Amino acid sequence: MSETVQESSPAATETEAAEAPSNTETLLVQEGDIAGDYLERLLDLLDYDGDIDLDVEAGRAVVSIDGGDDLEKLVGGRGQVLEALQELTRLAVQQETGVRSRLMLDVAGWRAGRRQELSELGRTTAEEVLASGKEARLRPMTPFERKIIHDAVAAIDGVHSESEGEEPNRKVVVFKS
């Protein structure tokens, strides 16, 4: 039995490495594909129309469903149905991959719009605290919502934010530094 060993030049190896997607990105694409299949079956069962878009952003798989008239029902009041659907989708991905997913799901652009609203709320609250010197407590929020508020507050010098309380009543408090 003979073996042929092919040596590659260092330049070829570097080029191949640069062209090959990272292992992490490959896993995230796989997560997105699994989630897309799961959500497509769900939309079929519900007889809802929607286009599923898969992407990888900031080290996580991002799945968006857009286009159907019934999709707002999958968001629910204050995004509660969306949060539950996201968790079910993460569990479906975990069941197939064996790895806990951090997948982000958006339906009908709700999260994108909410992100804008919360960034504005964080910025204006930080400016009010900076001007008045009085701390501000916001209403309870999901981890997704709190993260956006913290990021918006962090962009303003002279204030900082912390989360307090227990889920589901955890809220952001903004303080003057």
Image (cartoon, helix red, strand yellow):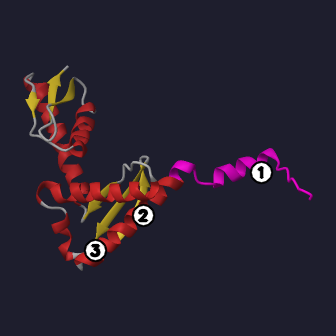
Within-10-Å neighbours for mark 1: few <14, some 14–19, many 20+: few
Q: CA distance from mark 3 to mark 2?
A: 14 Å
**Magenta segment, which residues?**
1-25
Is residue 2 magenta-colored? yes
Residue depicted at 92% across the width and 58% down the height: 2
Residue with the most extreme bottom position: 47
Count up the numbered dots: 3
**Three-letter amino acid code of the residue under disc 2:** Ile
- Secondary structure under badge 2? helix
Residue designated by label 2 = 34
Image marks 1 and 3: residues in contact by CB distance under 8 Å: no
Residue designated by label 1 = 12
Which one is in front in this view, the residue at disc 1 or the one at disc 3? 3
* In this picture, residue 56 sits left or right of residue 154: right
| Rendered image quadrant of residue 66 | bottom left
Q: As displayed, is residue 68 above or below residue 80? A: below
Residue depicted at 25% across the width and 60% down the height: 85
Is residue 63 magenta-colored? no
Q: Residue 19 at what x, y percent from top left?
A: 64, 55
Residue depicted at 26% across the width and 56% down the height: 112
* In this picture, residue 66 sits left or right of residue 77: right
If you read the primary sequence from the N terminus, does the residue marked by circle 3 or circle 2 appear first? Answer: 2
Quadrant of the rendering where the C terminus is positioned: top left
Q: Residue 138 at what x, y percent from top left?
A: 10, 36
**Three-letter amino acid code of the residue under disc 3:** Leu
Q: Residue 43 at what x, y percent from top left?
A: 28, 74
**Three-letter amino acid code of the residue under disc 1:** Ala
Quadrant of the rendering where the N terminus is positioned: bottom right
Residue designated by label 3 = 43
Nearer the observer, 48 or 10: 48
